[in-house]
Amino acid sequence: MALSAKPRPEQGVAAEWTRRDEAVMAPVLSRMTEVVAASAQGSWITDADGTRLLDFTCGIAVCNIGHCHPAVVSAIEKQARTLIHTSVVARSPAPIELAERLCSLTPFVDDPRVFFCNSGAEAVDGALKLARRSTGRPGVIAFRGGFHGRTLAATSLTTAKGRYREGYEPLLPGVYVAPYAEPLRTSAVDALAALDDMLAQVAPPGSIGAMVVEPVLGEGGYVVPPLGWLRGLRERCDEHGILLVFDEVQTGAG
């Protein structure tokens, strides 16, 4: 049975877990399925009633390593037996080695540095803080259909669905939303022209610290934009001293 086809459990162990979940968990995040996962291996999940399901979602596309791969389990177990947390109290070899590896994957960046976060929303918030701090400009341009997270700042940039914003206004000020270049709706030329109009009439470049964009649109429809549009964003950011931030939490770094 495919994971997406699993109906809501009406009886059995899974139904009991569902009732207990709804009694104590805040109903803020909706579930993609009604599965109550008990265990998993590789591409397969076993639910609380023992039904085996093929997992097509894999952590909403951000964890394409399957479930419980022996190498991953071994690495987690090894670290848990060595050191679990240090927060900001001390340095630790493992995150330093990981940062070095990530820096080696960005030869196009001069003197790259890494900042580890707990979530994609925190990474977006960190990018906004970096933009304000380094440019001295408060404004930010986001793009229609984007999803950047559920913190207040990240929600201010999110327009994938209206319900993400509903009930949380007023959101972060100084956020402008420009068209995303979707091949079936808005061409790269038209999207860039609309952005130019925004910079000329609504959002003066001298007040914009960053443009934040998904290089491949995620929740907004899984859209791969024309490369010329992304290059156009790069050119305008370079021209006006604006930071270009790629939110690649779903699409994968690079």
Image (spheres, grey):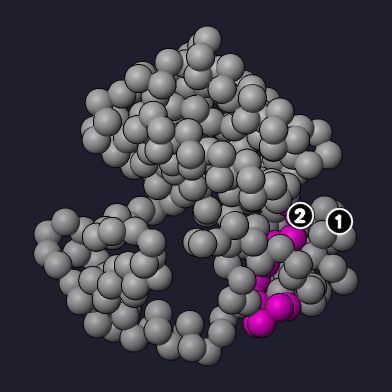
Labels 2 & 1 near each other (Cβ < 8 A) = yes
Q: Residue at x 48, y 39 (%)?
A: 235
Q: Residue at x 44, y 43 (%)?
A: 245
Q: Residue at x 48, y 82 (%)?
A: 72
Q: Is residue 110 above or below residue 175?
A: below
Q: Residues within 10 Å of mark 1 (few under 14, many from 20)?
A: few
Q: Residue furthest left?
A: 90
On the rendered image, what quadrant is the N terminus found in? bottom right
Q: Residue at x 64, y 25 (%)?
A: 193
Q: Kindly identify the amino acid type of the residue bearing the numbered disc 2.
A: Glu
Q: Secondary structure at mark 2?
A: loop
Is residue 185 on the magenta stretch? no
Residue 189 in view (yes/no) = yes
Q: Kindly identify the amino acid type of the residue bearing the numbered disc 1.
A: Pro
Residue 71 position, x and y percent, is 49, 88
Give whichever of 95, 174 is nearer the camera.
174
Start and end of the magenta stretch?
Answer: 31-44
Residue 240 position, x and y percent, is 39, 29
- Which residue in the structure is indicated by mark 2? 34
Q: In the displayed structure, does residue 65 sit left or right of residue 30?
A: left
Q: Is residue 24 above or below residue 251?
A: above
Sequence order check, earlier mark of 2 and 1? 1
Is residue 36 on the magenta stretch? yes
Any mark on residue 188, and which? none
Q: Residues within 10 Å of mark 2 (few under 14, many from 20)?
A: some
Residue 86 position, x and y percent, is 19, 64
Any mark on residue 7, and which? 1
Residue 204 position, x and y percent, is 43, 15
Q: Specify the quadrant of the image occupied by residue 65.
A: bottom right
Q: Residue furthest top?
A: 201
